[in-house]
Amino acid sequence: MTTMDRLIGAGVERLDGPAKVRGTAPYAYEQDPGEPICHVAVVQSTVNHGRITRLDPAAAEAMPGVLAVLTPANAPRLGEGLASDLPVLQSLDVHYQGQIVAAVVAESSEIAKAAVGAVVVEYSAAEPDVALSADRPDLYAPEQLMAGFDTDSVIGDVDGALATAAATVDATYSTPTQHNNPIEMHTSMARWDEDRLTLWDANQGPHNIVNDLMTAFGLERGQVRVISPYVGGAFGSKAFTHPNQILAAMAAKVVGRTVVFELTRQQMFSLVGHRTPTIQRVRLGADAEGRLTAISHEVVEHTSRINEFAEQTATATRVLYAAPHRRTTHRLARLDVPPPTIMRAPGETPGLFALESAMDELAHAAGIDPVELRIRNEPERDPERDVPWSSRNLVACLRTGAERFGWAGRDLRPGVREDGRWLVGTGVASATYPARRRKAECRITGHGDGRWTVEIDGSDIGTGAWTALTQIAADALGVELGAIELRIGDSDLPFAGGAGGSTGLASWGSAIVLTARDVRRELDERWGGQLPADGVVVKGEVPGPSPHAQDWSMHAFGAHFVEVRVDRDTGEVRLPRASSVYAAGTIVNARTARSQFLGGFSMGVSMALHEESVVDERFGHYVNHDLAEYHVATNADIGDIDIHWLEEHDAYVNELGIKGIGEIGITGAAAAVANAYWHATGLRVRDLPITPDKYFRELGLG
Ligand code: MOS
């Protein structure tokens, strides 16, 4: 931090807020291409694994207003090399229920949807194979996990250490399939001008989508432009290209007009990914003082028949606590399910539910306060990589959180506090998420009149990045906020990776800071420190990960404290209050950061108590594929949440000391709720979500 930093840290209101509130910020569906728009609707497979034996589009084609019915028989051929779930309508083979098997392009969305019902499709199909279990004979070890993590890690002699431990836990936890449900459904509006494609699209990074469109349609860079200035949430589901973008571009090409394809809420349960279910066996061994001697975390999860998505579920276990003997493993089953994808803190979120529940169970077994147990197991260095921390303040988060929450004097015994009909308990869990940086480019234009344009293909998916990046740019250039015009969300802008892995601000912000440095140098060297009347244009970049990433372990940390009340008669769960404390490096915008922490935590509460995609194993589909039956936490479910963060200056992660905050809030949150539930009731629910039926099951009544 320098004395220049006047805006970084301030709670600046969202610059894009007024336009969003007034409805003048165009989302993908609302873009105006300057001509009437056609609509796409899709026919989706009703079987999980098989082949189309008959597909008759004649009745649909004959309907007035229908412009085309695309099928595997007539769809344009796509280029080779796409990810295996992207070649839309290229084959008669079916790999998951909900796969697009035909598409109608029509003058209106009503006509398109009506015509979908007139397309006749018949299949030959095998029984759906959709049930994950830990004893499937076909479980296999993927070559590596998402984000390049090793599949397994083994240090020392875990079994030997467990055999001689004074206290042990051996428990299996499970988390269900979950679906990302941003408010804005995935939407793509496509237009071709000769051989140039424009796609207005809801995504987490336009450059991410461009490459797949180039491959699909044999285009050169410069022939595809993806535009997405405003995005109504994503949580990972809009990070990668899905079939919707390819299909929209294909349909526009076929009919020679602008088309829009907006998924329905129901279609989001098959076409744009989900979080894999997990089955996790955790074994912990500790000495008489509660010092861990062994940690074992074995994960079973699923992927689809056609793509391998190997979620990094146990990787947080590799960094959180000290123990000389350690093991983490990941095994996958290939099932007849739609392709899984990333969903807010993929890996860390389900993984920490298991590890942090097990730590609570160990605290009980050893008779130690669960905050104290965690503090006793604080590692001095990264326990698996054996490198120092760039900064680590988990203990400070635990102590500060305990103070703010009022943890002192807590009774260790479960199931002994009542307030009328409510059983009352409190719980704690740790949070952690990696701090990373990615390559990003930036262009800064200084105009003679003192205004500045800052251009980078970053993305604000509702996080506040638009505002935070403007604060960073104003500080870096030493000007007022109002002098900056920030342009993001357009693949014609300088390259940047998408909003994902909590890397956005760290990467884009660093690119802006480094480019602004070049601007100041150019002004000093050539123009005597003044902005010339004709202005200046400077292009800069951050080349990739921090140069310190090899030699330092870089993570954000946090701690959640939760009070839970359980109705003794109905099993209804209430969460009246919580405190979360984070140590996540530089906080750029106090207002939008609080919103990110709060949103992440709320999503963790939602995971603990509500979210579950229920698969019917006979028919192979998600039966609760809408927001009426896939429950997410609402305002009424979230009590008084105290969000706090510690001052933390990390000199290694990036130029600004930013660790990223989009995901850490959800990590550990579900375990804190489950631990508080146990403390309230004495019942240990190890399979999420903690719904009222499980209260009766655990009581032996259900
Ligand atoms: Mo986040 S799941 O990396 O978009």
Image (spheres, rainbow, N blue to C red):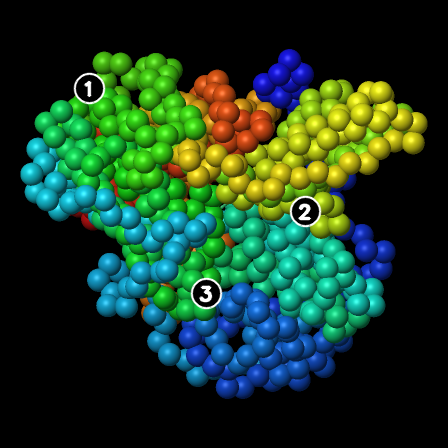
Per the image, label 1 sits on a secondary structure element best described as: loop
* 379 shown above or below 700: above
Number of residues whose C-alpha sits closer than 10 Å to that of mark 3, classed few (under 14), some (14–19) or many (20 or more): some
At x 21% / y 22%, what residue is drawn? 369
- Residue 417 location (% of width, % of height): 21, 22
Q: Position of residue 182 (x, y in %)?
A: 55, 46
The structure residue drawn at horizontal position 66% and vertical position 52%, both measured from the top left corner, is 207
Residue denoted by label 3: 307
Residue mark closest to the camera, 2 vs 1 = 2
- In which image quadrant can residue 469 be found? top right
Quarter of image, res 23: top right
Question: Is the C-beta separation of discs 2 and 3 under 8 Å?
Answer: no
Q: Position of residue 485 (x, y in %)?
A: 78, 32
In the rendered structure, are the residues bearing label 3 and label 1 in contact, judged by CB atoms less than 8 Å apart? no
Where does label 1 land, which residue? 411
Q: Is 555 situated left or right of 20 in this image?
A: left
Which amino acid type corresponds to the residue marked 2 in the rendered image? Phe
Secondary element type, mark 2 = loop
> How would you rate the neighbour count of disc 2 (Cα within 10 Å): few for under 14, some for 14-19, many for 20 or more?
many
**Mark 3 belongs to which amino acid?**
Asn
Task: Specify whether 261 is left or right of 383.
Answer: right
Please name whichever residue, 327 or 562, is drawn nearer the observer in this view of the structure.
327
Q: Nearer the viewer, residue 44 or 90?
A: 90
Q: Give the quarter of the figure containing the N terminus.
A: top right
The residue depicted at 45 percent of the width and 19 percent of the height is 646
Identify the residue at the far front of this view. Answer: 525
User: Could you give the CA–CA distance between mark 3 and mark 1, rounded to whole angstroms?
Assistant: 49 Å
Among the 4 quarters of the image, the one containing residue 510? top right
Can residue 661 be seen here? no
Q: Quickly name the residue at label 2.
A: 495
Camera-near label (2 vs 3) is 2
Residue 273: which numbered mark, if any? none
